[in-house]
Image (spheres, rainbow, N blue to C red):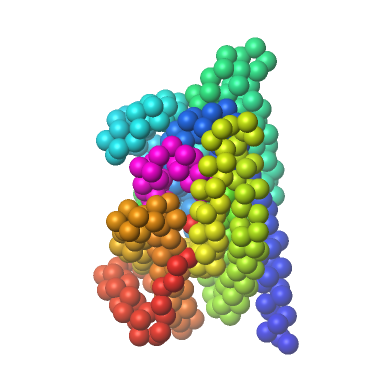
Amino acid sequence: MAGMTGYKHHTKAILSLGMPLVGSHVAQFAITLTDTIMLGWYDVTALAAQVLASGFFFIIFITGSGFAWAVTPLVAEAEARGDTTQARRATRMALWLVTLYTIVTLPVMLFAELIFLAIGQEAVIAELAGIYLKVAGLGLLPAVVVMVFKSFLSALERTRVILIVTLAAVVVNVAFNGVLIFGNLGFPEMGILGAAVASVGTQLVSVLLLIVYILRKLPEHTMFQRMWRPDWEAFGRVFHLGVPIGMTTLAEVGLFSASSVMMGWLGERALAAHGIALQISSLTFMIHIGLSNAATVRAGRALGRRDWTGMRDGAWAAIAVSLLVALATIALFLLMPETLIGLFLDPGDPRRSEVIAIGAVLLAAAALFQLVDAAQVMAIGILRGVQETRVPMIIATISYWVVGLPVAYGLGFPLGWGGVGIWLGLAAGLAVASILLMLWFWRRVYPRLSQGEGSLSADDEAVENAADSAALLVAADHDGVRPSPGP
């Protein structure tokens, strides 16, 4: 009975912390989603170009966000110890790191058209995607700064303000899109360029709202005083934790972006259908991301308190909630795929029926990997909470690029399965990742923590981690675990 009471407590805590985060992630994703819907109604060619461009932008953005996500476990642990100074130091140096990252990566977006042409995309789509990124790239800095502030506020369990600000951003983005894409209220019709301008404006509004909130509601953190002063110890901690987080996310996001490139080889309609199906599956995935963020905060605070029983029970509670969501998503994808795909297309577009037919098959494939996708993102969230990021990076790289990408290409092209083959390859990579990440936490990380040996993220574990990761590939087979098709 005590155990059940404990799980109920942790489930309630996960939902209380996680639901505003889920809402904020869904709202954040809705910014991209509204771009996709409104451009789909504007022109299918513009939609295909935006799918390609937004995927490219997202790779750069999500890699830099690793420094932002490093803030959550560091601040959560510090706050559990009552160390406000350490929480502020980590957040400030994360702001330094994302600014430096933006300076380094922004030129890549300016030459994106040449990159798209080099990887075999159609000339008109490459040109439109390049136009989009030349403007959207200007929003990279405010976008990653927003991520730092959201991670900081999440660790403080101030998730409601994150939801409110993100919802405001959705409203702003829809208004900007309506004016700039279609040329309403006397503005010129800008199409895909208007969507890019709207995205930049939305990011600026978001960052300003968060700055005002931190200044007014959290003056004790003195976040913006002496921002120019370096703090190399905190800089190093954020860097060494953030780089593996960014690389882990890059491995997964890169796989999905590579799938967009391969779908582009199948033609404009296939790419548009892929983009819509990916938007839908990614929207439901935002629920798991929010729950994973909550698990990171809860695990980080348990680490700060050295509460190993609470960490274990909280982890199982988070996993259970996420898997229930996955089951509901499977039913949704299988029961009404045509309805979901049709929301993104103009009823009068002559290509509508073909895009819907392709997209419905892809959603059926997406239903196959919902459970393993939920499992892998929850495992990553828990591992981040205990500041274990190196081995997850290795596991992600192996799962997505040694397994997922080759299987996607092999099924899609040599075997001739087309788009559904590409998506089944994505499923295979996610399945392997979910199994190995769960094994790593429950069989290696948690036992060491609970036995008082400290976090595996210490520097003296770096060499051992790589070998242990490879050993897990063998152990998975010995334990009777078989990767199965299953972001």
- In the image, 287 versus 204, the foreground residue is 287
Residue 295 magenta? no
- In the image, 328 versus 103, the foreground residue is 328
Q: Is residue 224 in view?
A: no
Res 211 quadrant in image: top right
- In the image, 91 versus 202, the foreground residue is 202
Q: Which residues are magenta?
A: 249-278
User: At x 54% / y 67%, what residue is drawn?
Assistant: 371
Residue 270 magenta? yes
Q: Is residue 326 in view?
A: yes
Res 351 quadrant in image: top right
User: At x 62% / y 72%, what residue is drawn?
Assistant: 320
Q: Is residue 369 above or below residue 151?
A: below
Picture coordinates of residue 96, whole percent (x, y): 42, 41
Picture coordinates of residue 42, whole percent (x, y): 57, 27
Q: Is residue 388 above or below residue 101?
A: below
Q: Is residue 332 left or right of residue 43?
A: right
Q: Is residue 150 above or below residue 420?
A: above
Q: Is residue 368 above or below residue 446?
A: above
Picture coordinates of residue 233, whole percent (x, y): 38, 53
Picture coordinates of residue 444, whole percent (x, y): 41, 79
Q: Residue furthest bottom?
A: 1
User: At x 70% / y 82%, what residue is drawn?
Assistant: 4
Which SS does the magenta portion mostly show?
helix
- Count of marks placed on residues: 0
Res 10 quadrant in image: bottom right
User: At x 62% / y 67%, what residue is drawn?
Assistant: 327
Q: Is residue 276 left or right of residue 343?
A: left
Q: Quadrant of the N terminus?
A: bottom right
Q: Is residue 401 left or right of residue 88?
A: left
